[in-house]
Amino acid sequence: MKPKKRCNASGCRRLIDFDTDYCDKHKGFGDKDYNKQIRWNIDNKRYAEFYASKEWKNLRNTYIAGHPLCERCLKKGIVKAAKICHHKIEIRVDWSKRLDVDNLEAVCADCHNKEHGKKGKENE
């Protein structure tokens, strides 16, 4: 019998074989090919370069420092640390808002994943 451990997905308590990373529900959740297929895809080069830029990193760090708690969770009365600086209006939709502070919100990974559907249909 193989030893067991918890699934690597945040908050998942399912036990899985020790030599795997995610349970069946979260397979593909930690996909290492994401950056290669999405972020660094030739079609997304403009956006990838922006997110790697010094001006974005400085703005993101400043915004998170000023908003250390997830803004969406706070509206629900939940106190949770923000880890991601999210564009309310995607930069693909309006490139001019990429550095607009009024277009940013500090969110936790769970809220960000819900926004982008990374956890599957159970969050809809």
Image: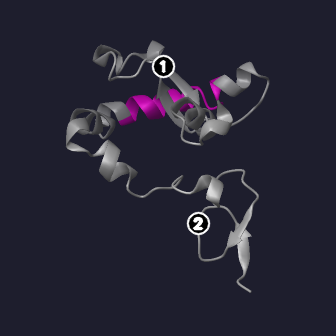
Between 84 and 93, which is closer to the camera in this rendering? 93
Q: Residue at x 50, y 27 (%)?
A: 63
**Real-space Cα separation, disc 1 to disc 2, in angstroms:** 31 Å
Mark 1, secondary structure of its residue: loop
Q: First in sequence, mark 1 or 2: give its number.
A: 2
- Which segment did they paint magenta? 57-71
Quarter of the image where the C terminus is located:
top right
Q: Residue at x 49, y 31 (%)?
A: 85
> Overall secondary structure of the magenta stretch?
helix
Question: Is 17 placed above or below 41 here?
Answer: below
Q: Residue at x 30, y 41 (%)?
A: 52
Counting from the top left corner in percent of width and height, residue 57 is at 38, 36
Quadrant position of residue 46: top left
Residue 88 numbered tag:
1
Query: What colouring style does the render use?
Result: one colour
Q: Amino acid at mark 2?
A: Asp
Q: Is residue 98 left or right of residue 30?
A: left
Residue under pointer 2? 21
Q: Is residue 98 left or right of residue 31?
A: left
Question: Is 99 placed above or below 56 here?
Answer: above
Mark 2, secondary structure of its residue: loop
Q: Is residue 98 left or right of residue 15?
A: left
